[in-house]
Image (spheres, grey):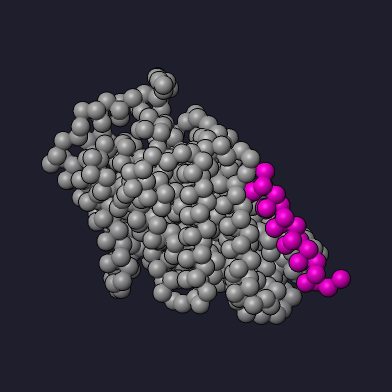
């Protein structure tokens, strides 16, 4: 059999496994809460790996190894910022958000939580945040489909649009059929595939090179300064910008919604250990892949046309084609896990936070699930249509997405969880300010404007939200509910139903 045949077999096995998980989850969705949050029944391991897999996408297997391959370890500051941000997110957001979303009207989406938490009679905050999620995540999903199309085009010589349709079709089927439970368990498998592949490549690569010493010597022969954590092209502003990526975690709806689905707030500690452990192994594997890539191509010769394919190239060089096929599937897993998570969050915003709020209709649980499945399909079709002829506009907008969500939702979520004086007007104004600053700052260049836009947007959001909230006064019922949520999160009280 040819190399392509072996790799195609591995890919088919992966696709069948994802569809099987979707079918398994189908019979476990009895109501809307099950479909959108798996009935708040996820254990810490599934929660942690689902959050990690939906977060990292193809950046972990292609972007990060490629950057480290070209420039050296100095490019690792982003990974440091993301790891610290993820730890803080698990430590301070996860347990309290899990508690507070249940105390505040059993909220199952981020917009509904903000609305219920602040008792916003106008519901403007819910509508605004729902629209932000709907618009930006539709573009985000489209970007993932573009990545899937390019993946099949570059790996198998398949037509871009056929590859896009294949990725979109498989992802939509298991998301539409199995809901949050299917997405979470496919994320579990995909997360394990990603970290296993990232660890296998450098380990086998070092053996291929003759050991750690030979690997280090080969890297030093290429670039004696490869291990420098501060390089001549790295400024203090650049390091601050890289570390600031960690701020984005507090406001990514597709990540923090995992915290809302945990069985209990107490399981956040175990989830944190699993999640950060997974992240450390994954980032170490990405760095190791880059190091081995530098050493292999220095010793064995040959040029790597696209540095971002160093993981793919090493996998095909060091492993049997069938195993290399599963490594290709790991890249696809990274793409699909993010697309599925974003599809479900966008669907929830469309149904829970916009449709039901506008129509004010009483809808049965069965019909809500049906509407949600239809909305998953609708968002996927729109995103696929946008991705059919990829252009710079979509990709450029997605470059703002992490900063946009981080600066608009991040401070709002943190203040809602830790400051009882927050008011609906303050939260809404802060959210809009954060998003506006990101959009404005990101289109300016030179000097201080080279700072990553999430940091000024984050600070501006907090300043406006706090300032405007101090002018007004929160509802006494809001303060009482806040105290109840804090007591439950601290374990000094339990939920009463």
69 to 349, vertically: above or below: below
Where does the N terminus fall, quadrant-wise? bottom right
Question: Would residue 73 be visible to someone looking at this image?
Answer: no
- Position in image of residue 48 (x %, y %): 56, 42
**Numbered marks: total:** 0
171 to 316, vertically: above or below: above
Q: Quadrant of residue 220?
A: bottom right
444 to 401, vertically: above or below: below
- Position in image of residue 269 (x %, y %): 51, 33
Q: Is residue 19 magenta?
A: yes
Q: Which residues are magenta?
A: 1-25
Residue closest to the far left: 471
With 55 as the anchor, is 327 left or right in this view? right
402 or 366, nearer to the observer: 366
With 60 as the anchor, is 212 left or right in this view? right
Q: Is residue 106 magenta?
A: no
- Position in image of residue 178 (x %, y %): 60, 47
Q: Quadrant of residue 113?
A: top left
Residue closest to the far right: 1
Where does the C terminus fall, quadrant-wise? top left
**Residue drawn at point x = 26 percent, y = 31 percent:** 478
With 438 as the anchor, is 85 left or right in this view? right
- Position in image of residue 225 (x %, y %): 54, 68
**Residue drawn at point x = 56 percent, y = 37 percent:** 30
4 or 365, nearer to the observer: 365
Per the picture, the main secondary structure of the magenta-coloured stretch is: helix
Question: Would residue 380 be visible to someone looking at this image?
Answer: yes
């Amino acid at each position: 059999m040819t190399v392509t045949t072996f790799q195609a077999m591995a890919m088919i096995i992966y696709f069948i496994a994802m569809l099987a998980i979707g079918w398994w989850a189908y019979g476990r969705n009895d109501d809307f809460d099950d479909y959108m949050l798996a009935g708040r029944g996820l254990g810490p391991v599934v929660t942690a790996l689902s959050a990690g897999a939906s977060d990292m996408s193809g950046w972990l297997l292609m972007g990060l190894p490629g950057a480290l391959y070209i420039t050296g370890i100095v490019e690792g500051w982003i990974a440091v910022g993301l790891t610290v941000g993820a730890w803080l997110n698990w430590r301070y957001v996860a347990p309290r958000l899990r508690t507070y979303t249940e105390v505040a009207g059993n909220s199952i989406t981020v917009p509904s939580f903000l609305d219920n938490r602040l008792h916003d009679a106008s519901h403007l905050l819910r509508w605004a945040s729902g629209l932000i999620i709907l618009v930006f995540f539709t573009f985000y999903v489209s970007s993932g489909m573009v990545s899937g199309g390019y993946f099949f085009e570059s790996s198998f010589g398949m037509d871009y649009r056929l590859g896009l349709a294949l990725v979109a079709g498989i992802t939509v089927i298991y998301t539409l059929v199995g809901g949050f439970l299917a997405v979470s368990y496919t994320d579990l498998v995909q997360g394990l595939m990603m970290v296993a592949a990232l660890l296998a490549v450098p380990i086998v690569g070092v053996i291929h090179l003759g050991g750690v010493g030979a690997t280090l010597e080969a890297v030093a022969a290429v670039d004696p300064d490869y291990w420098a954590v501060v390089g001549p092209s790295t400024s203090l502003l650049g390091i601050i910008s890289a570390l600031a990526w960690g701020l984005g975690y507090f406001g990514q709806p597709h990540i923090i919604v995992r915290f809302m689905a945990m069985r209990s707030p107490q399981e956040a500690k175990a989830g944190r250990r699993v999640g950060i452990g997974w992240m450390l192994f994954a980032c170490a594997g990405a760095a190791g892949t880059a190091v081995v890539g530098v050493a292999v191509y220095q010793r064995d010769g040959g040029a790597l046309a696209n540095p971002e394919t160093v993981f793919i190239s090493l996998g095909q060089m060091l492993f049997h084609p069938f195993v290399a096929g599963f490594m290709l599937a790991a890249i696809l897993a990274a793409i699909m896990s993010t697309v599925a998570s974003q599809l479900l969050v966008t669907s929830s915003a469309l149904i829970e936070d916009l449709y039901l709020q506008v129509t004010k209709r009483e809808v049965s649980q069965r019909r809500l699930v049906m509407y949600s499945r239809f909305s998953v399909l609708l968002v996927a079709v729109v995103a696929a249509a946008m991705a059919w002829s990829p252009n710079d506009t979509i990709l450029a907008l997605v470059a703002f997405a992490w900063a946009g969500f981080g600066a608009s939702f991040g401070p709002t979520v943190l203040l809602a969880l830790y400051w009882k004086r927050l008011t609906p007007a303050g939260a809404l104004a802060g959210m809009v300010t954060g998003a506006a600053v990101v959009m404005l700052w990101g289109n300016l260049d030179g000097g201080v404007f080279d700072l990553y836009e999430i940091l000024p947007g984050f600070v501006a959001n907090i300043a406006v939200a706090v300032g405007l909230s101090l002018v007004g006064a929160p509802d006494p019922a809001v303060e009482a509910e806040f105290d109840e949520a804090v007591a439950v999160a601290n374990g000094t009280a339990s939920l009463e139903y």
